[in-house]
Image: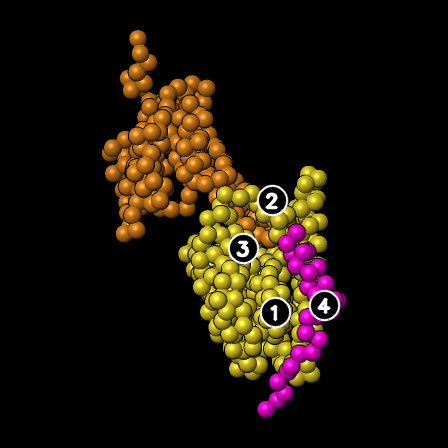
Chain colours: A orange, B yellow
Amino acid sequence: MSDNIDNQQPNEETPANQLTGRTFLCVVDETEEFAAALQFACRRAHNSNGRVALLYVIEPAEFSHWMAVGERMREEAREEAEEMLNVVASVVQKRMGHMPVLYIREGKLREEVINLIEEEDGISLLVLGAASGTDGPGPLVSYLVEKMAGKLRVPVTIVPGNLSEEEIALIT
Amino acid sequence: MDIYLPIAELSVNVFLLLGIGGGIGALSGIFGVGGGFLMTPLLIFIGIPPAVAVATGANQIVAASISGVLAHWRRGNVDIAIGVVLLIGGLIGSTLGVWIFSALKAIGQVDLVVNISYVVFLGIIGSLMLVESIKAMMAQKAKKRKKSHVHNWTHGLPFKMKFRKSRLYISALLPLAVGCFVGILSAIMGVGGGFVMVPAMIYLLGMPTVVVVGTSLFQIIFVTANVTVLQAVGNQSVDIMLALLLIIGGVVGAQLGARIGERLNGEQLRGLLAMMVILVALKLLLDMATRPADLYSILRAAV
């Protein structure tokens, strides 16, 4: 008697305490492809009665000779991160009806993503946006696909950055 | 294997120079750009006349700053608008500084002034850094950050300009003054000035920290280039052999330093740097106070 979530009917507005199922983790940044990835994650979460998790990684600030300056850099970076996450979280709230799970981590992007996935068992899927330009899909995507995909605890879904909302709706 | 430095007018071991260039390069790789202020004293220690050390040291900073700026530029962290104002101030200041330098050289006091400036500068900075490190080790929590946009007398100054990237609306005279001061320092001491400029930009001008480093590097490129050219043309004090050896050592050292720097702890590094700065200041002071090896030095009079 497996808990087959795909058989459940998706609800319009699911109260948070009735959410079972998967958590879709999205890495937040300011790129265009993140919008596509977020859209994908929201729709998947909605259709499977799951929720969205957002991760913002604060990269370590440059070394500065003065401790006061370094601390101030950290504080400002933290404020930026919180602001950005709040904006994105309110978007998710509007689309899905409940708040996403928010994570802020400090450290190197690729390490923190992997660490978070290891720590939080509830995360079921990592959703990443891939840039469509000539520079390649993006450093995180390249790294994860080339080196880590086989070793991660969860599958990785790579969403092309140039998919439109309609196209994403069709596949979720 | 000794090599003769034409302008410095002495022979130095090649490997020693490569080593110094490499060491300073490593420091700037570890600490970010900013080893310059230690390079000049080190050169003075090995016997290079302070005038030559200052001018040649300034040259070293140009290249490092350029590569630094590119990295920040790609991330959109350089405020060109305020950078240009700083730079204009810097050009004025550095030209003034080189003029002061020439005047000192004419009366034969330039070595003394450079030495004293370094002792004072390094002494103050080293002590400040040490105090910071000690406070951090005693785990004093930083006080709550006050609002950075406090309206004081500086907001009454004229010539206000909008600096979009830094989200500031302040008088252009402020960055001009900061740039000018740093320019003078740069000309007389052969430093980039980032050490002083970064805190000034954050606390005096109120810029957001994310653009501060890139913008300061931007300013430093032009100011140190100006200093190098003016010193070379006006004072004949840039030694090309010296510069070449230092650059070669510096490039290699910076790569190594960057790799080492990634593994080290910021607090330890700062403590280490503070100690080094103070030691250098003390040694300079000592050298000034004790009997030199050569009681008399020969200065070329104006031809």
State how far apart marks 4 and 2 are (Cα). Answer: 30 Å
In the picture, the disc for residue B27 is 3
| Label 3 close to label 4 by CB (< 8 Å) | no
Q: Which residue is mark 1?
A: B47
| Magenta region, residue range | B275-303
Tell me if B160 is positioned left or right of A48 in this view. right
Asked if marks 1 and 2 fall on the same chain, the answer is yes
Indicate the quadrant containing the C terminus of chain B: top left, top right, bottom left or bottom right: bottom right
Does residue B78 appear in this view? no
Asked if marks 4 and 2 fall on the same chain, the answer is yes
Q: Which residue is mark 4?
A: B288
Please state the horizontal and vertical placement of residue B233, each as a whole percent of the image.
Answer: 53, 82
Does residue A146 appear in this view? yes
**In the image, is residue B279 part of the stretch drawn in magenta?**
yes
- What residue type is disc 3 on? Leu
State how far apart marks 3 and 2 are (Cα). Answer: 14 Å
